[in-house]
Image (cartoon, rainbow, N blue to C red):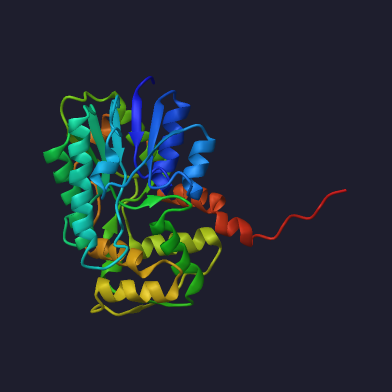
Amino acid sequence: MSQRVLVTGATGFVGGRLARELAAAGAEVRCLVRSRTSPGGRALEREGFSLHEGDVLDPPSLRGLGAGVDAAYYLIHSMGRGNSGEFAARERAAAVAFAQMARAEGVGRVIYLGGLGEAHSRHLRSRHDTALLLREYGPPLTYFRAGMVVGPESESYRTLRYLVQRLPAMIAPAWLRNETQPIHVDDALAFLARSLELDASTGQEIQIGGPDVLSYAEMLDRMAAILGIPRRPRVPVPLITPWLSSLWVGLVTPVDAGVARPLIEGLASPTVVTDPEPMRGFAIDPIGFDEALRLAVAADPELSRARPAGRARG
């Protein structure tokens, strides 16, 4: 791989892993960071990445970001942090600024990771609107859509684990029955990386997911089994809304309520692959949900700290 690639969100869970995978494959990787002196920025710089300090909400700071870049990964979203009524407007402004920079500076293509499902929630609607704006104002767009990305530091995985670990029983709103199609982070990264092999002249939409279609209730039960915890009884409360559920999740887990809200609201409708044909063209065979959970649990830094140290030998 000899392409020059830009990765935004490189200090995040997916972006950092992607930057390292692309670099290991031989790509020349440039990372957009808000501050090179932040812990994430310093870590990337120590690993030899080229950094550009800037903010997608500050268009002048993006000048020169796309110079000489063949492909740019747009992995930025606010997840509802901040004032509840403003995150969608921020995401729209950020997408337009980035797309305009990419087109003006000759970036060959933009690759974006959004969400599966109909855009009924503000969170999913905002992520889909981001794709539309990137396509309208920027270079050709490859638009990936995924449901839950399973990995040791993903907010969706952490929320699932905390609910199982911390509650002897939990309420069971109607949205627990909605189906989703989770994918392990390594499989999502494989799709993102291989998209560089696609024809850059035309954009496309690619829905990706693992082989298992599960309700959130089933995922809770499978998480309990892998953690060795008895399945938690659920008390049916069919009328509780996703918004109220997100407040409750924010109270009983360490997940920020502003992050829990878009995650739970996104479960108000099914998030499954409805057009698998583009995904099949990648010849990637994603692992199942149980194996994805086992890998995430084994690599989970919080669980590692909680495990007792092994007895010394000698």
Q: Would you say 245 lies left or right of 100 here?
A: right
Query: In which quadrant of the rendered image does the N terminus lie?
Result: top left
Q: Residue furthest front?
A: 60
Q: Up-down: is 58 above or below 239?
A: above
Which of 76 and 313 lies nearest the eye of the viewer?
76
Please state the total of marks drawn on the protein image. 0
Q: Residue furthest top?
A: 2
Residue beneath the point at 72% across and 57% down? 309
Which of 265 and 221 lies nearest the eye of the viewer?
265
Residue beneath the point at 29% across and 74% down? 173
Q: Quadrant of residue 268?
A: bottom left
Which of 182 and 204 lies nearest the eye of the viewer?
204
Q: Up-down: is 280 above or below 94?
A: above
Which of 58 and 172 lies nearest the eye of the viewer?
58
- Residue 276 seen in render: no
Residue beneath the point at 29% across and 42% down? 61
Q: Position of residue 36 (x, y in %)?
A: 45, 43
Q: Up-down: is 7 above or below 272?
A: above
Q: Residue furthest right?
A: 314
Residue beneath the point at 22% across and 63% down? 86
- Residue 24 seen in render: yes
Q: Position of residue 119 (x, y in %)?
A: 16, 56
Q: Would you say 185 lies left or right of 140 here?
A: right
Q: Position of residue 99 (x, y in %)?
A: 19, 39
Q: Would you say 49 lies left or right of 59 here?
A: right
Q: Position of residue 4 (x, y in %)?
A: 35, 25
